[in-house]
Image (cartoon, rainbow, N blue to C red):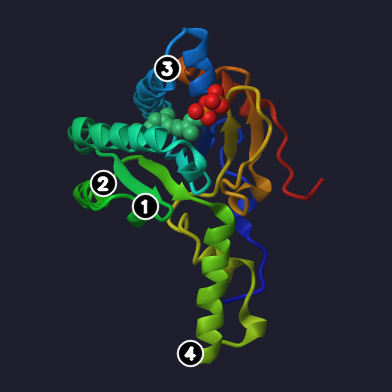
Amino acid sequence: MSSAPILETTAGDPERPRHVAIIMDGNGRWAKRHHQPRLFGHKAGVEAVRRVSRAARELGIEALTLYAFSSENWRRPEQEVRDLMGLLRHFIRSDLAELVRENVRLRVIGDYRRFSADVADLVDDAVARTAGNTGSLLAIALNYGSRAEIANAARELARRVRDDGLQPEQIDAPAIEALLETRDLPPLDLLIRTSGEQRLSNFLLWQAAYAELLFVDTLWPDFDAATLREAIAAFGRRQRRFGGL
Ligand code: FPP
């Protein structure tokens, strides 16, 4: 471990982000606008997941990370949590073949083992079946919380100090980063939140340190390839300085 700066934050292609993350917000409001129950909005949200992950591949984005279920989402009514699990189960069953065919590597970040055993097993199977793929990465955040992710890294470093002779002075930003769940994803370039809300909601707090943040009014079920292209164009207009001039 070194105290060198994290050089990966010194830019790739200024026009095209390598790694885009999205806080998919607004399913409930979209459903309300259509005078439908919330589940209708979440179903339309899954359609948007399909559309946008295809569009991201076509645009040559290396990694797309989607916030599907936060560690705080357990506070929602039990039925809604069940509905979201049902949609996830259905999504994996129906879309895995396409992900395999399209050479996509599926990753999951978050403590998804807290979901029911059948969902957790489906996730494990889907991740394993795409592990050998070499194309773009689709990371889905399930029961994910950024503070817990950072706390887990800190706990592991403390354990290494106690058991493995790690010196506290050796603990630096790269050491923490190497223990985050996103360690094998490219650095985050662009973080989008839909539906007009302007919060990070415990999503990729560490990784967002030098990401461009983009808040769009579009409700997630209306997000499509054109919205993604506009977001990337907006990214291309940003000046990224990473603390320099
Ligand atoms: C936010 O809308 C959305 C969520 C909490 C869930 C996102 C889930 C999906 C898009 C579907 C499942 C995903 C996969 C990958 C199968 P909200 O309900 O908070 O909307 P509101 O703020 O308008 O009420």
Identify residue for label 2. Answer: 119
Q: Secondary structure at mark 2?
A: helix
- Amino acid carrying mark 1 in the image: Tyr
Mark 3 vs mark 1: which is more N-terminal?
3
Disc nearest the viewer among 3 and 4? 3
Identify residue for label 3. Answer: 37
For residue 72, which numbered disc appears in the image? none
**Who's the residue at 55% across and 87% down the image?**
161
Q: Is residue 114 left or right of residue 117?
A: right
Q: CA distance from mark 2 to mark 3?
A: 24 Å
Identify residue for label 1. Answer: 112
- Amino acid carrying mark 3 in the image: Pro
Which quadrant of the figure contains the N terminus?
A: bottom right
Residue 60: in sight, yes or no?
no
Examine the rendered structure and indicate whether residue 131 appears above or below residue 102: below
Disc nearest the viewer among 4 and 1? 1
Q: Is residue 178 left or right of residue 5?
A: left
For residue 164, which numbered disc appears in the image? 4
Q: CA distance from mark 3 to mark 4?
A: 53 Å
Q: Position of residue 17 (x, y in %)?
A: 54, 36
